[in-house]
Image (spheres, rainbow, N blue to C red):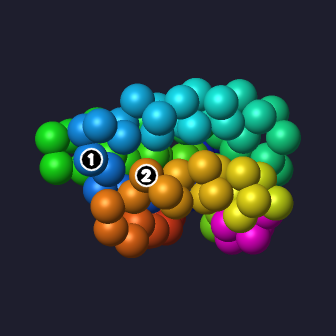
Amino acid sequence: MSTKAYLEITMVIDDANRPAAAKVYTDYRQPFLSQIKGAVSKELLIRTEDVQVLHGFDSIENVQSYLESEMFKNDVFVGLKPLLAAAPDVKIYTVA
């Protein structure tokens, strides 16, 4: 399965909340890869100014489905929401 699309979620998270945010990432990484249709990869990228989660998918359609999924709306988002210092920036890319 090759990557055809990416979902990038950029979040501003205060240093004090980063360990809790990393736990949300760790807790849902394997369920994401094994349960979400078309999921290919999931990486946590950390910078001084923000944190990004880069999700690889086999199609744009499966990116859209994940954003509407129970896992995203009721587990991942609920776990991260109190840790966010600003609204997350969500971008979807296709592979050229």
Q: In which quarter of the image is the N terminus?
A: top right
- Please state if 61 lies on the left or on the right of 45 as rendered: right
How many dots with numbers? Answer: 2
Residue at the limit of the structure toward the left, as seen here: 48
Q: Is the magenta stretch mostly helix, strand or loop?
A: helix
Q: Position of residue 12 (x, y in %)?
A: 29, 56
Q: Position of residue 65 (x, y in %)?
A: 76, 67
How crowded is the residue under tag 1: few (<14 C-alpha within 10 Å), some, or many (20+)? Answer: some
* Residue shown at the point (57%, 37%) measured from the top left: 24
Q: Distance between the Cα atoms at labels 2 and 1?
A: 8 Å
Task: Give the residues in magenta.
Answer: 64-69
Q: Which amino acid does label 2 sit on?
A: Leu
Report if the CB atoms under discs 2 and 1 are less than 8 Å apart.
yes
Q: Which of 49 and 4 is in front in this view?
A: 49
Q: Which of 76 and 58 is in front in this view?
A: 76
* Residue shown at the point (71%, 64%) measured from the top left: 73
How crowded is the residue under tag 2: few (<14 C-alpha within 10 Å), some, or many (20+)? Answer: some
Q: What residue type is labelled 1?
A: Asp
Q: Name the residue under label 1.
A: 14
Determine if the magenta segment contains residue 37.
no
SS of the residue at dot 2?
helix
Q: Mark 2 points at which residue?
A: 83
SS of the residue at dot 1?
loop
Q: Is residue 33 visible?
A: no
- Please state if 16 lies on the left or on the right of 58 as rendered: left
Determine if the magenta segment contains residue 68.
yes
